[in-house]
Amino acid sequence: MRILVVEDEEPIRNLIAINLEMVGYEVLTSENGSEALALLEREQVDLILLDVMLPGIDGFTLIEQINLEETPVIFLTAKENVLDRVKGLRLGADDYIVKPFESIELIARVEATMRRYKKSNDKIQFKDIEIFLDQRIVKQNGKTVNLTVKEFDLLQLFLLNKNMALSREQILDKVWGFDYLGMTRTVDIHVQRIRDKLGLKDNIKTVFKIGYRLED
């Protein structure tokens, strides 16, 4: 899957690219609207992360020149003005992310948009494990492994954020939701169950005083 990142601030552009590449996406980058438009004329991409405030052709102008039926767009904006968000969505953007944002939020929104366009793979392969996202089935060496709902959601979260450290609080938020009143010990218990069921003790690393990270 190829993603075009259009962002004029180099540190932000590079950070986004690194995070996307870490979870398996191919990334193209552009620092302004004119360059992005020229790139899109010769390259096929599956999604565009588009900054609003760009030199030359801004994000709002650029989106009007993109075939949105084939290429989803997520706006990146430092503006917190509701009118700017509404304008972007009315122009056809699928989502927006207000800067600054966490890497885990970026990856989650990208994956959600890809799935809406049916551009993401419905199967993830990790070592000898196959995860069928739509069917919510996990197989190891061809044999089905029974996971609970939360174990599956937790495994999926790790796989979509491979090599990234996730805090226990982030995991609780993404897997159990904002309203979950349990303690972070719940995360530790579920991580241990996944390690045992799938033999991932050496791959799901404990990050001291933070949480966990799934490593290749």
Image (spheres, rainbow, N blue to C red):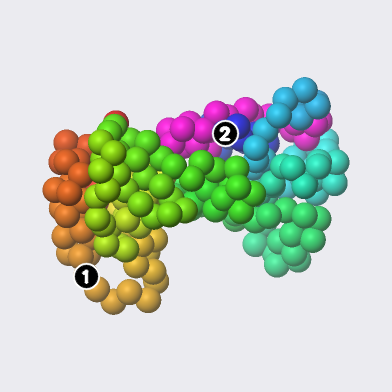
Instruction: Estimate the x, y position of residue 122 in percent, counting from the top left.
Output: 48, 45
Which residue corresponds to the image point at 54% horizontal and 43% vertical from the top-left?
120
Q: Distance between the residues labelled 2 and 1?
A: 37 Å
Asked if residue 20 lies in the magenta stretch, the reply is: yes
| Circle 2: element type | loop
Compare marks 2 and 1 and give the one earlier in the sequence: 2
Locate the C terminus and report the quarter of the image it occupies.
top left
Pick the front one: 119 or 27: 119
Q: Is residue 20 left or right of residue 150?
A: right
User: Mark 2 or mark 1: which is in front?
Assistant: 2
Residue type at mark 1 is Met
Reading the image, the residue beneath label 2 is: 1
Pick the front one: 54 or 141: 141
Image quadrant where residue 189 sits: bottom left
Asked if residue 30 lies in the magenta stretch, the reply is: yes
Reading the image, the residue beneath label 1 is: 183
Q: How crowded is mark 1: few (under 14 residues within 10 Å), some or many (20 or more)?
A: few
Instruction: Estimate the x, y position of residue 80 in percent, counting from the top left.
Output: 65, 62
Image quadrant where residue 87 sits: bottom right
Residue type at mark 2 is Met
Identify whether 25 is placed above or below 123. above
Q: Is residue 165 left or right of residue 193?
A: right
Which residue corresponds to the image point at 37% horizontal and 36% vertical from the top-left?
125
Q: Is residue 3 visible?
A: yes
Magenta-highlighted residues: 15-37
